[in-house]
Amino acid sequence: MRIAIFGAGGAGGYFGARLARSGEEVTFIARGKHLEAIRQHGLRVDSVLGDFVVSPAHATDDPAQVGTVDMVLLGVKAWQVTTVLQTLRPLVGPETTIVPLQNGVEAPDQIANAFGAKHVVGGLVKIISFKVEAGHIRHAGADPYIAIGELDKRPSKRTERLRQVFERAGISVEIPTDIEAALWQKFLFVVSWGGVGSVTGAPIGVIRSMPETRRMLEQSMSEVLSVAQARKIAVADDTVIKTMAFVDTLPQNGTTSLHRDIMDGNPSELDFWNGAVVRLGQEVGIATPLNSFIYNSLLPRELRAQGKLSFPE
């Protein structure tokens, strides 16, 4: 299968490397030093499941050089999705499927609005991975998992074909009966962990062990659950309990990409995580006081990272 990885960071880079290693025809769309390193040395992956290097690795910064592909794995940040959609066009032919990997719930609709629903499936991944440096990805925890599904919830030949591709690469893959509910279940988890972690500056081991911050996690999750159910998303009532049980299995030093971006002074997905909870809750009349506090507390640092506000450290 011809596959383009658009955004070869922690998630896109890792899954793209696994697909390339299994023999798929993978091209990484990257830029700058990351692109140079991949071209010169291949893509290095350090993983709790075993280290490897994809070399040679096909990489470019120009999608037009690649042409149409069967699948695009869109691994850019949530705040970058709408800005890169036009750049994707050379990759998209009549049968191309775009699989968004963003942590959030809005990307599938954004892509469908640009290319039509026939070109997008819902996608989500579960992995703790990040770019260490140019050409170097680290998978630090969690068994790599991807879920894909049609937005209309119907079985399809293309999702089954994609499932087989990921399965051949040794990746745990699933086609949920309701990808929208699955996206919101992950959203509930990552938004709460990311928001509380960013406000406290603490890794998950500390957050879950302190009664005060553990209650914050649970409250944030409950707010997301209320928003989802008010929007008629079929997220089960016991999702918070099950998610907290999963939180207790995470590596003690684990942090989210939101936390790392905020701490490093980089633009983050705040508007599409906690900000989205607030915004989507307002649309259906659901109050989200903790997520509002988290969003408002982090917003000055986010605006500074975007160059829209200036104040000293």
Image (cartoon, rainbow, N blue to C red):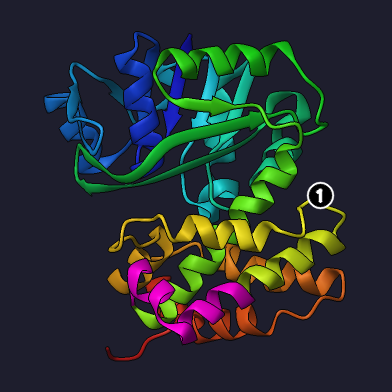
Q: Which of 96 and 145 is in front in this view?
A: 145
Residue at left offset 30%, top offset 39%: 31
Residue 204 colored in magenta in the image: yes
Q: List the residue tagged with mark 1.
A: 234
Q: Nearer the viewer, residue 30 or 213?
A: 213
Figure quadrant of residue 162: top right
Residue 101 in the image, given as x and y percentages of width and height:
53, 40
Quadrant for the C terminus in the image: bottom left
Residue at left offset 47%, top offset 51%: 77
Figure quadrant of residue 230: bottom right
Residue 270 in the image, given as x and y percentages of width and height:
52, 68
Residue 183, relative to residue 153: is it above or below?
below
Residue at left offset 48%, top offset 87%: 212
Residue at left offset 64%, top offset 14%: 160
Figure quadrant of residue 34: top left
Q: Which of 124 and 213 is in front in this view?
A: 213
Extreme bottom residue here? 312
Residue 189 colored in magenta in the image: no
Residue 303 in the image, given as x and y percentages of width and height:
46, 77
On the question of residue 94 being in view, the answer is: no
- Judged left or right of residue 146, residue 11 is left
Q: What amino acid is labelled 1 in the image?
A: Ala
Q: What stretch is highlighted in magenta?
A: 202-219
Residue 64, relative to residue 287: is it above or below?
above
